[in-house]
Amino acid sequence: MKTRYSLLAGTLLLHATSQACECSMVLPYTFCETLEPQWNEPHAVVLGVKLNEVYYGMRVKVIEVFHGDVSVGDTLTVWGDNGALCRHYVGTWNDGDTVVWGLHDTDFMGNEITAGFPPDLEQPGDHHISNCGTYWLGYAGGMVTGPIAPGVASTTVANFWAAMEECLFTAIPTAPSENGLRVIDGEGGPWLVLNAKQRAHLTITDAMGRSCLARDWDGLPVHLSVMAAGVYLVRVQAEEQRWVKKVAVP
C-alpha cells in the first residue's frame, strides 16, 4: 500500500482545509464510526481488488460484499479526487491491492468540476470514494486491518461485521420513541411497527452486513418470520427521522 493508516488523519485534515473540500473539521476516525447515521453512510461496503486506473478513477473487482446492492464478481467504476473534490486520490492504492472500501453512489461532482479532465466521465451506476471519514481498510493474509472500530485494528473477513457490532449498536442515536420503530415479540417471531404511520424506507441486513430486505414501507406491521434465525440490523428512514435497531429472530 502507498499510504499508512498513521497518515490518515493528517490526509483528512489536509483535504478538509482545502478550498474545494467542505468536510467537517471533526471527522470519525474508525470505519465503524463512519457508518453511524449522523455521517454520510456508504451505499456499499465491499472487499475488492483494484484492477487499474482510468483518468481520476479506478476499476474495482468485487470479491466479497458486506453491504449494498452489488454482487461478487462485479467490476465497479470508482471515482476519486481530480484535484478539486473531497475524495481520496485513487493513486492511494496500487493496482492489485485488495482493500475494504466504503463506497457511495457517485454524486457526479467530477462532471461539475472537471479540473482539466474530459467532461461527463461519471455515469449512473458508478461510485466514488470519500475522504470525509474513514472509508477504507487494508487487507492481507486473510485479515482486514486498520482503524476498524475503537480498540479493533484487525479481524478476519468472516468476523468483520461482528467486530464492529458494539460500536454500531451503542453509538447510533435514535429518533424520539413516541414516533419510533417498535419491535413486538409475537408467535413465530418478531414484528416491526412504526408508532406513527408514515412513508418510510425499510432496510434489513444480517450480521455480516448482507442485504436481506430493502423496500418502501407504510409503517404497518412487518412479520420477520420469513427470516432465518439470527441477529439482524433494521434501519428505517422517514423524512428527517431515522431509527436503527438490532433484532433477534429465534
Image (tube, rainbow, N blue to C red):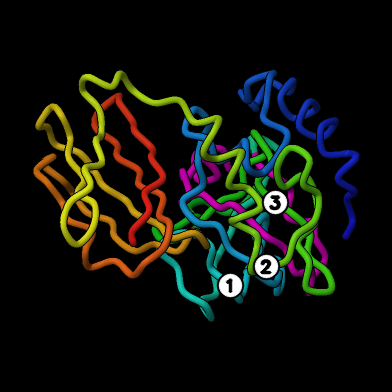
Q: Position of residue 78 (x, y in %)?
A: 58, 59
Mark 3 crowd level (few <14, some 14–19, many ≥20, 10 Å Cα)? many
Amino acid carrying label 1: it is Glu
Q: Which residues are magenta?
A: 87-115
What is the quadrant of residue 91 in the picture? bottom right
Most extreme residue toward the front, as rendered?
187
Q: Name which residue type carries label 2.
A: Val
- Whether the residues at callouts 1 and 2 have beta carbons within 8 Å, the answer is yes
Name the spot of residue 207 as percent of width and height, x first: 49, 59
Q: Which residue is mark 1?
A: 64
Q: Is residue 100 above or below residue 6?
A: below
Q: Which residue is mark 2?
A: 157
Mark 1 or mark 3, earlier in chain: 1
Can I make out residue 121 in this image?
no
CA–CA distance in space, label 1 to label 2: 9 Å
Instruction: Give the camera-side residue of 23 and 185.
Output: 185
Q: Residues within 10 Å of mark 1 (few under 14, many from 20)?
A: some
* Residue 241 seen by the camera: yes
Q: Dividing the picture into quarters, in which one does residue 45 lie?
A: bottom right
SS label for mark 1: strand
Q: Residue at x 46, y 51 (%)?
A: 43
Q: Which residue is mark 3?
A: 136
